Amino acid sequence: MEKEKLRLDKYLWSIRLFKTRRLATDACNDNKVRYQEESAKPGKNVHLGDIYEVRTEGRKWVIKVTGLLHTRVKYEEAIKHYTDLTPPEELEKAKIQAASFFSGKRLSKIGRPTKKERRDLDDFMEGED
């Protein structure tokens, strides 16, 4: 029966929301994990049916615990132990951020002009003299 107790930080690490258990613990301590609108401590016991809001580096998650996982397993296994209840608008935000932040490219029509746009601007400015 003792095996049924599972710490929140260990659970978040084992379902692969965080790369290391240390990152999961730090997230709990930094109020990035919430349970019923309140901060959840890393030592909190996880129970089936619990719903957590988790802010990770890339996005915000809303997960429901569907199985207790004591060890880290491959992704295909890990996703069977929780249900992702994240609202669709959060997922869209994550996609937009991923497109601009991680690819190294900027979103089109935003930021600096392209080389062609600069030439057109230069031609336009010279035409006014």
Image (cartoon, rainbow, N blue to C red):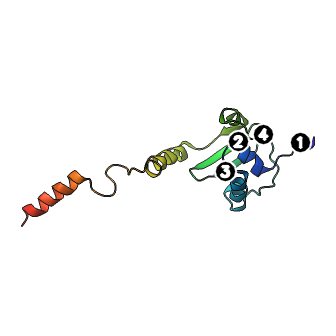
Report, in whole angstroms, how far the alpha carbon at label 4 lies from the one at label 1.
11 Å
Task: Tell whether label 2 touches label 4 (CB within 8 Å).
Answer: yes
Instruction: Say which residue appears at 68% left-offset and 55% top-offset.
Output: 23
Q: Residue at x 58, y 44 (%)?
A: 87
Which residue is drawn at the image coordinates 12% and 59% (left, top)?
A: 124
What whole-number distance in Å separates the C-alpha atoms at marks 4 and 2?
7 Å
- Which numbered disc flags the more N-terminal residue, 1 or 3? 1
Q: Looking at the image, tell me whether mark 4 or mark 2 is earlier in sequence order.
A: 2
Picture disc at residue 3:
1
Q: CA separation, marks 1 and 3?
A: 25 Å
Residue at x-position 73% and y-position 43%: 14
Residue 37's quadrant in the figure?
bottom right
Q: Amino acid at mark 4?
A: Leu
Name the amino acid type tagged 1. Answer: Lys
Q: Position of residue 17 (x, y in %)?
A: 66, 46
Question: For the residues marked 4 and 3, what is the alpha-carbon distance in whole angstroms?
Answer: 18 Å
Tell me the kind of residue under disc 3: Glu
Q: Which mark is residue 69?
A: 4
Q: Look at mark 2 in the image and give the residue it sits on.
A: 15
Residue 36, visible in the rendered structure: no
Give the residue type at disc 2.
Ile
